Image (tube, rainbow, N blue to C red):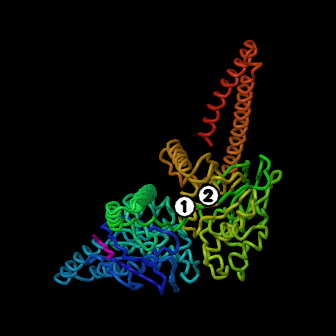
Amino acid sequence: MILSVQNVSKSFGTEEILKGASFHIEENEKTAIVGINGAGKSTLLKIIMGELSADTGEVILAKGKTIGYLAQHQEIAGERSIEQELLSVKNDVITLEKRLRSMEEEMHTLEGDALEKLLENYNRLNHQFELEGGYSYKSEVYGVLNGLGFAAEDYSKKIDQLSGGQKTRVALGKLLVTKPDIILLDEPTNHLDLNSIAWLENFLMNYKGAVAIVSHDRYFLNRVVSKVIEVSMHQVQIYEGNYSEYAVKKEKLREAQMKAYYNQQREIKHQEEVIAKLKSFNREKSIRRAESREKLLNKIERIERPEEEQTDIKISLKPNIRSGNDVLQVEGLAKSYGSNHLFEDIDFEIKRGEHVALIGNNGTGKTTMLKILNEMVAQDAGTVTLGANVHIGYYDQEQQILHMEKNLFEEISDAYPNLTNTQVRNTLAAFLFTDEDVFKRVGDLSGGERGRVSLAKLMLGKANFLILDEPTNHLDIVSKEILESALNHYTGTVFFVSHDRYFINKTAHRILDLSNHMLTNYLGDYDYYLEKKEEIKNQVLTEREVVVQEESENKLDWQQQKQEQARRRKLASELKNVEDEIEKQEQKIAEIDLMCQDVAVATNSAKLNELGQERAVCSERLEVLYERWEALSENS
């Protein structure tokens, strides 16, 4: 055991946060700490680190072990560059390296006993240098920088010039390079793109130490952790397994608790009825029996009704107007900012009812593309065409249209005056604003809370084409599940940018990957995208054998990229034609089946035979189309 938390309680004034929290973390164990926003997760981490004192209980770190902590917000500053900041962790090794280089120079000037003594010291220090990772520290530092998404040209940037997100990545990098025996991470994936998150997953899975992670990234937790510590209703509960296993076990536990509660309630009611009946007989013996039963009933240890932090709230999203089948058509779209070329000659379309995720690394132009669709940014070239009766609802966490002086109730009721007080409260409750929360000023809310208010307003607008930019940022897991459920029952069309892979898996039917200035279409969820991307990568590597994929992509000239884009457009067009033909044949078969149910046709053997032959031809044609579609999909 490397860390033990024993009976820790904490309150702020009259507000109880933690009550009797106890758990332990073993060496090399990877643990998640989960719970809704405000449950006390960050408070727990700060108590472990000694930044806050517990009201009761204690935290014990195993003797001789080191601990490192990444808070959500970093205050690092200074004139050092990113590279210097990370290398500062290795100051002792760097100093030792300089001493060894100096001794090597000195060897040329000595001889005899002096040289022998110097060589003896040199060998001793060189052994120490090797034990402290002296021959690998540079590859470690630059590997971490690269993994966290810093390019070589970023290394010289001063800390004071960085954004809050970049500072958090630098702090995370320093912590990983330090390699403490246990790492505490508070929302480590908030400022990372998909590639960096995947890198961090692999790093932590193979980390020779213990890790405790507070995160709302369920996909990340599924990959990394083997134990979940849930903070709920001031209490701590331990579950073995990853996040998905925890969710299943938690639901089963709650069902068992509710069953036990209701069974006991039925038994109590039965006993009370028997006691009342015995008393009604008004005989000495019956009264004695009633009193005996009452004593037994009073000795029963009553089971409390299981409490929940959030009821099963469902949001219903129903567009007022049904759009046409063609919702969005984008052709030849291009955008650059000076020498920063984002994308060119982008073509794609979205049909009614589709849920499409746009993914890609930071800086590839995803948010810019959404802003072009909403006419907030002008494209350099290309056309954007909306279909018939398409009404956009846009969520951009940086451009929220909220009134800082209003409270939450006023923000909703003023925007939608036809809603009753109950409807306003129910809407706010769906996004976890309950009781007196509805009277909080918008200006006093956190960024994540304002995001939830904006989402609530967006969903009340009942648009039929939702365009969402990182809708799950700063939402806790319960809020994400509510949003997922809402979108999955939404009958309109959704196009969204997200780094939340679990959310993408739950809500996307199709993925557009924006990379190398191009879009690649994947007909499936995030797991399907990963599978197909790996297949394509392996295929390319096989075809080119010893040629490294990254080097070959860098050598592609612009004309080759244009040819590749043209090939993809042709393939996409052919794929669409095949899909349209499949739909046509399936519709024809459905019509034939409907005709065969007609009484007049059912009694006409000649007509039935004719329809049967026609159906067989359609089915045969459909089988050929399916095979063609599969072949095209493999190359898409």
Q: CA distance from mark 2 to mark 1?
A: 8 Å
Residue 173 relative to residue 433: left or right: left
Residue 237 percent location from the top left of the image: 39, 66
Pick the front one: 250 or 169? 250
Point out the image quarter for the C terminus: top right
Query: Could you tell me the amino acid type at mark 1?
Result: Leu
Q: Main secondary structure of the magenta part?
A: strand
Residue 519 relative to residue 9: left or right: right
- The local secondary structure at tag 2 comes to strand
Q: Which residue is mark 2?
A: 359
| Residue at the far front in the pictured view | 283
Q: Where 606 falls versus 290 (above or below)?
A: above
The part of the image, by quadrant, that contains residue 112 is bottom left
Residue 515 percent location from the top left of the image: 62, 56
Residue 58 relative to residue 447: left or right: left
Q: Residue at x 59, y 77 (%)?
A: 163
Answer whether residue 61 is visible to the viewer in this image: yes
Q: Is residue 3 magenta?
A: yes
Q: Residue at x 66, y 23 (%)?
A: 620
Residue 517 percent location from the top left of the image: 66, 57
Answer whether residue 257 is visible to the viewer in this image: no
| Residue at the far left in the pictured view | 113
Q: Which residue is mark 1?
A: 194
| Other residues around mark 1 within 10 Å, as few (<14) / some (14–19) / many (≥20) | some
Label at residue 83: none
The part of the image, by quadrant, that contains residue 343 is bottom right
Q: Where are the magenta residues, as a range?
A: 1-6
Residue 432 percent location from the top left of the image: 59, 69
Q: Earlier in the sequence, mark 2 or mark 1?
A: 1
Residues at marks 2 and 1 touching, judged by CB atoms closer than 8 Å: yes
